[in-house]
Every structure is written in structure tokens, then in C-alpha cells.
Amino acid sequence: MALEVELKLTLSPHHIESLKRQPLFRSQQIRELKTEQLGNTYYDTPDQLLTQHKVALRIRKKGEQLIQTLKSSGTSEAGLHSRNEWEWLLNSPELDFQLLASAEWPKALNSETLQSNIAPVFTTDFQRTTWILDSLDSQGEVLKAEIALDQGTVTAAGKEDTICELELELLEGNGSELVKFALKLAKHVPLYISDVSKAERGYRLLQPENYEVYRTAAQLDATTNLEQGFIQLLKNELSLWPRYFEAWHFTNNWKFIPLALESLRNVSACYESFSTIIPTEPDGVIDKLLTKLIRQLRDIDAWRRTALLSGHKDNRWFKQQAEQATARINVLLQTAEPGVLALLISEQLIEKTWRNRWNDNHKQLAKQTLFDK
């Protein structure tokens, strides 16, 4: 078993060459390893019991090797993902259920009858180029990571979705340094934090018309202090608004744009409401980018609000406004700023940089419980 700690980013295929030309990829701290073709078959029952239990089971063809892999759902902390993964070499392209006994295989699935119903549900086929980052981090400590660029498709039920991802997997060092590295790239190439796995891409192709992004509640209780409350609320929004943008790419359903706008406004509200314990960053970059993005989305979404007010959102003039707004949102999401904003907030949450500006009053306030009466 291995514990993966990774940062997954998505990008447009149009920006791949620009990414490879970045000075960081040409420096001595990064060396290219190889490019290989990877084919994967994912398995589940007809009623998708495996994904309901938050595990992914696949067989990967890697050159002449066949590898059976089981992945657990894991956790996500401000964009960094941690999850358990088990891998076994196979002699033939059939699942070996005996191997799963040594992993965290849900007991509810440990049935021969159920396992006999497990069958292929979708496939992924992509080219992976890998590099090794071998450097010192911002604190002078060793930082090693594998960088993987995946380009290809996921195919399910006769439908396809594009895979274009940059994954940074920590091999040695501090996970927050992956975010710092990504920030250096994101200032020149639009990169977006993403927690949409290849497995999720496959499952949603099975019923694309039912695809939703569900809002979750922040984990708060009677013991939560003010600092913890700020962190949990902000983490929750950071897991949402990038997903709403990604959902827009997948569905072209306009409902995800006002949802993204609302989530970004929630981010702004968190900073304002907790300003007595979260001093503003000296450079004000997060505030400037957040204010700019909210204003841009608000203006782009204006056609919808006006159309609803008119009661005639299906007339020709509002349809033309909708087409123009669609073009504007697509242009906006090809710029670097939304991705940089998410990474800056992720870095801030992981390192708790506001503590560097705390005085004694900040420290005392931060310890107060959120639900004090």
C-alpha cells in the first residue's frame, strides 16, 4: 500500500506546448523521464456499488505489464489530495479478487455473488509524459515530486470526454511546496485545481444529463474556534467554485456559472467576516483577484438576471445576450487569473500565513469558539 499526496491540475490542450516551454521545465531541477501510452479499464457492478463505497478498481496496461489497482476515496485538504492505493502485477487481464483481501476492500462487497457481477464500465486511454522534480524548497529542504502530463480520452457508453491533466505527486518533502511550484507555472499557463478523477469522468459519461455538483456543509461543531471556522468554511468553497467551472466545461449548462459566482462571493464573505483574526495579506493580491473575478462573473451573468426579470428569457434578444455571455465566460476561463487565485488561497490555507501578522489580540480572538453565545 502507498499513500498518494498529489496536486491535480487541469489545463486546455491548447496550452500544452506553452507549458513545456516554461523555464521551469528547462531548468536543471527537472529531468524528463519518459512518454508512454496507458490503457485502463475500470470495473463496477451494474448498480455501481463500488463507486457508492468510494473505491475505484481498474486494470492498467502499461507496456507489457498488467497492473490491478484499488484506490480509496481519501481526503482533500485545500487542493492537495491524499488517498491509499494498492497495486498488484497480473499475469492475465482478469480481476484477481483474492488480492483485494490485503487491501481496504469494503466488507459489504466481499461476496462471491456480488463479485461475479463486477464488469468493465468504462475505459481511459491517454499518453503520459513524466518528469522528476529534484530540488530544494523555499525553506532549503529536499523536495522531490513526479510531474505527469496526461493527454487522452475517457470513453463510456459510446461517449468521450477529454483528459488533459497535470499531476504533481509528492515523493519527498512538504506538500505545500507542490502548490508553490504550481503557482510559478500558473502565472504563465492557465492551470486549475481539480479533484475530478479519471474515474469520475467515466462515471458521469454514463448519465451526463444527470451530472450535478452537490454543495457540502463545512465540518463545524461546538469545539470549533474562530480560526478553525474560517479554515473550514474557506476550504469548503475552494472545493466548490473550481468544480462549478469544470462542470460548465463538461455540460455547457449555464446554471453552474451563477453557482460559481455565489461560491466566490462566499469566499469574499469569509475574508470580511473573519477580518478581525485574518489580517489582510500585505500585497492584497488575493483580494484584488477575488474582487476582479466576482465583478467579471457578475457582469457576464447579467443577461440571465435581466432575462428572469423580464419573464421572457427565451426571446431572440436574450438568446443573443446568452451567446455573447457564453463566449465571454469561455475567454475568462482561458486566462491565468482564476487558477492563480485558487492556488494562492490553497497556499494560504495550508501554511496559515495570516499567523505571521498576528498580535496578542488576534491570538486571543482566534481561540474563541465559533458558537459562543
Image (cartoon, rainbow, N blue to C red):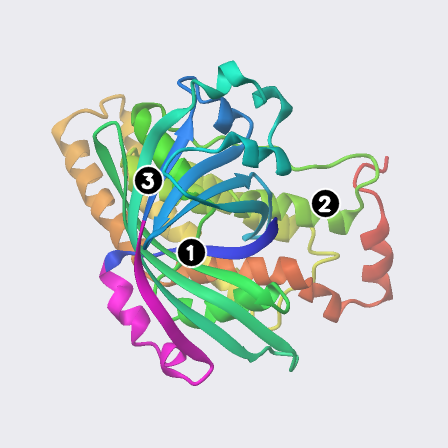
In the picture as drawn, the residue positioned furthest to the top comes out as 113
For this view, does 233 lie left or right of residue 214?
Answer: right
Pick the residue in front: 90 or 5. Answer: 90
For this view, does 296 lie left or right of residue 225?
Answer: left
Pick the residue in front: 175 or 86. Answer: 86
Residue plotted at (50% across, 27% down): 50
Q: Is residue 293 visible?
A: yes
Residue plotted at (22% across, 32% down): 159
Q: Secondary structure at mark 3?
A: helix
In the rendered image of this protein, does residue 6 appear above or below residue 22? above
Residue plotted at (47% across, 35% down): 57
**Which residue corresponds to mark 2?**
229
**Which residue corresponds to mark 1?**
9
The kind of residue on which mark 3 rests is Trp
| Disc 3 + disc 1, Cβ < 8 Å | no
The answer to if 23 sits in the magenta stretch is yes
Please identify the quarter of the rendering in which residue 256 is found.
top left
Q: Quadrant of the C terminus?
A: top right
Residues rendered magenta in the picture: 14-38
Could you say where residue 64 lies in the image, as x and y percent from the top left?
33, 53
Could you say where residue 92 lies in the image, as x and y percent from the top left?
38, 39
